[in-house]
Image (cartoon, rainbow, N blue to C red):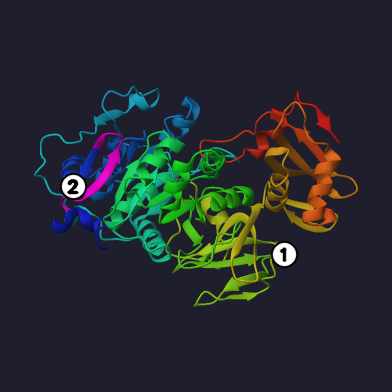
Amino acid sequence: MSSLFPALVSGSTARRPALRFGDRSLTYAELAASAGALAARLDGRERVAVWATPSLETAVGVVAALLAGAPAVPLNPKSGEGELGHILGDSAPSLVLAEPGVELPSPVSDLARVDVQVGAAGQDTPARPGTEPDDPAAPALVVYTSGTTGPPKGAVIPRRAIASTLDALADAWQWTGDDVLVHGLPLFHVHGLILGILGPLRRGAAVRHLGRFSAEGVTRELGTGATMLFGVPTMYHRLAEALVEDTELAKALGGARLLVSGSAALPVHDHERITAATGRRVLERYGMTETLMNTSVRVDGEPRPGTVGVPLPGVDVRLVEEDGTTIASYDADGTPTGTYDGETVGEIQVRGPNLFTEYLNRPDATAAAFTEDGWFRTGDMAVVDPDGSVRIVGRKATDLIKSGGYKIGAGEIENALLEHPAVHEAAVTGEPDEDLGERIVAWIVPADPEAPPAAEELADHVARRLAPHKRPRTVRFLTSLPRNDMGKILKRALPDAVAKAPKHD
């Protein structure tokens, strides 16, 4: 296949900005030199780890590994020793690439270490396109899942998945070499690394990484030439809060060409606040580690809060019942067929070049993840709205509530709760109920901890907006919701978080 990064070997882009982290930056010529020199040292390596700090070194290290055809294993610097030990034991990298001067914890420190040199000797060394594997199925990355249902599994991401996803997003978002992306996402997962770093580099565009996300950083970068912003719902929530008094932030967001949220659903309330203050709508897309990106709202389409758009070019999507019966699917031109009434819930299954090839060393888990006819079981539940947009209602394991004969998605109840002025944050789960099968439980962070809203008031609020059978039967109040590094709510940790909090039934 052709190079993942044509701009690295094109003379026309040599002086164009490629990467900027704080006050440090590289042009495409400088990135080609640094990555090319490092790639020469990685030839023949079966697998290399990357200590994925938010730095130029991480970006250069991953690009070098891809140029050399050495699959990279990004490591989360916040992981504990137990998790790091599992990942290293499973992936068996021959060395770790790291930022000079950064102290590595055990067991990472036991690996042979290569410090990534940026702007060192060898600036005339070109990137070597001939060293990149020609096989589109060749592994490019091994990205470990969050491990919420057991030890993290290493999803082997082939080169074709990266190329097809980034090219499909370029089509959906009209992403070009003239764009400048700003984000502050971590670099050990799909969103921050593949979309946020490799995405601009494949287009010949520029990326400015904030290091640490802040409204001030977003204002500064969007106000000085950046055209796109990637973030997660926690980040957009903070921006929505800051917009109340920050006119410069509103102006900066309003001037952006594209605002994209991912990794979890952005509450409708935050969508509406951002649009009201800036005149811009936030686009959502849907993907996961094993599939990269599956759907997106198109930049030339009509974004609707709460939806993740339509299948990306080349990606097949269908919704199925528990017995495998297809509820809805899309034909070749992207038109939905079957039941797309915005109410009938099914599991999303996908098929296409964007998929991972296997879970490393886990043939049993790999086989279980696919249907007999080759569709990947995402475990995410959704409906297809009448206009053809996919709307995620939650994870099958934690967000699908079967109550009184109904299948209810937690997401729509969470959105309804967030519309109540006394609710700051909300999560919804189900728990066993002798009469209903499962009852709906709302976990609430009140806007005023000293004066939480009455449980019955919240239940009635939901019933009025949705339907009586979707009202919470139990309400529990917290000071905060447990979240992971990406801002996703850890619903399995909610019982521990509320152990000493008052219960309001």
* Residue 479 pos. (x, y %): 68, 28
Would you say residue 279 is visible in this rendering? yes
Would you say residue 266 is visible in this rendering? no
Q: Residue at x 64, y 60 (%)?
A: 382
Q: Residue at x 61, y 71 (%)?
A: 387
* Residue 138 pos. (x, y %): 33, 56
Real-space CA distance between mark 1 and mark 2, rounded to the nearest whole angstrom: 50 Å
Where is residue 114, by image quadrant? top left
Residue type at mark 2: give it.
Answer: Ala
Is 353 or 425 nearer to us in this picture? 425
Q: Which quarter of the figure is the C terminus placed in? A: top right
Badge 1 is on which residue?
Answer: 343
Decide which of tag 1 and tag 2 comes sooner along the chain.
2
Q: Which residues are magenta?
A: 14-24
Badge 2 is on which residue?
Answer: 32
Q: Residue furthest right?
A: 435
